[in-house]
Amino acid sequence: MHCNGFKALASRKIKRDASYHQPNRHEPVNADSPAIEVMTDLQQVAVATTTIYASIAAATQTMISHGVRLLLVLNAEGQIAGLITARDTMGERPIKYVHERGTKHSELTVRDCMTPIEEIDVLSMKDVMKTCVGNIVTTLEAIGRQHALVVDELDDGQEMLRGIFSITQIGRQLGVGLQAFEVAHTFADIRAALAPVAAG
């Protein structure tokens, strides 16, 4: 686009019955809904991040302030080093680490409790585009995780993180209230919500 002269635009008064757009208004879904409807698309929503050097207390606070339960962990060069979830910072992992290493809880860093990049399971965006919500729930249950990352494969072979599936978000869109760290109960609740559709 080429602007000539930078003229002022015409302005007017807003209409009395005007409303406003709201981001991320998630529509209700069921087991047969397209999987993309429950994926956080990183082309539209910025991913929340932390660094390997941050304390787990700081990482927890970042999650709270962003309203998320997963952070992408970056190294000093800004590359993906891993991921950390609320379960990693507030669950059993920090307590176990303190007992095993004889360190203080306040000294734990994200690097101590995160899942390193080499252990991260990812899904292909190409596969996601061809599947439904029920498949994603089954996948998360099979890998025993509450989150799954989705990658785009570029023409040169590089992978770009494209999206995130969260069982909490899926539950919210299914209208299911979930317990914080009760993984077994979480999937049981999700299955119960999907059952009427699956059986129909």
Image: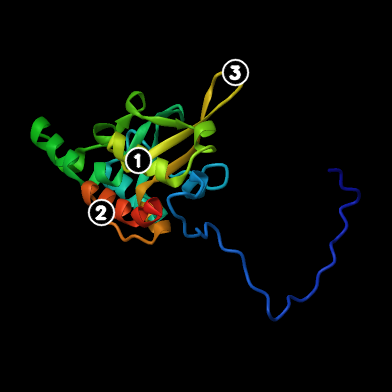
Residue 180 is tagged as 2
What residue occupies the far bottom of the structure in this picture? Answer: 16
Q: Residue at x 39, y 50 (%)?
A: 198
Q: Residue at x 57, y 42 (%)?
A: 43
Please, what is the three-letter code of the amino acid marked with disc 2?
A: Ala
Where does residue 117 sit, x and y in percent of width and height? 36, 27
Q: Residue at x 88, y 57 (%)?
A: 7
Q: Which residue bears the numbered disc 1?
A: 138
Q: Nearer the viewer, residue 103 or 48?
A: 48
Q: Is residue 146 visible?
A: yes
Please, what is the three-letter code of the amino acid marked with disc 1?
A: Thr
The answer to whether 156 appears left or right of 70 in the picture is right
Please, what is the three-letter code of the amino acid marked with disc 3?
A: Asp
In the image, residue 93 above or below residue 159 = below
Cα distance in 3D space between marks 3 and 1: 31 Å
Q: Secondary structure at mark 2?
A: loop
Residue 156 is tagged as 3
Q: Nearer the viewer, mark 2 or mark 1?
A: 1
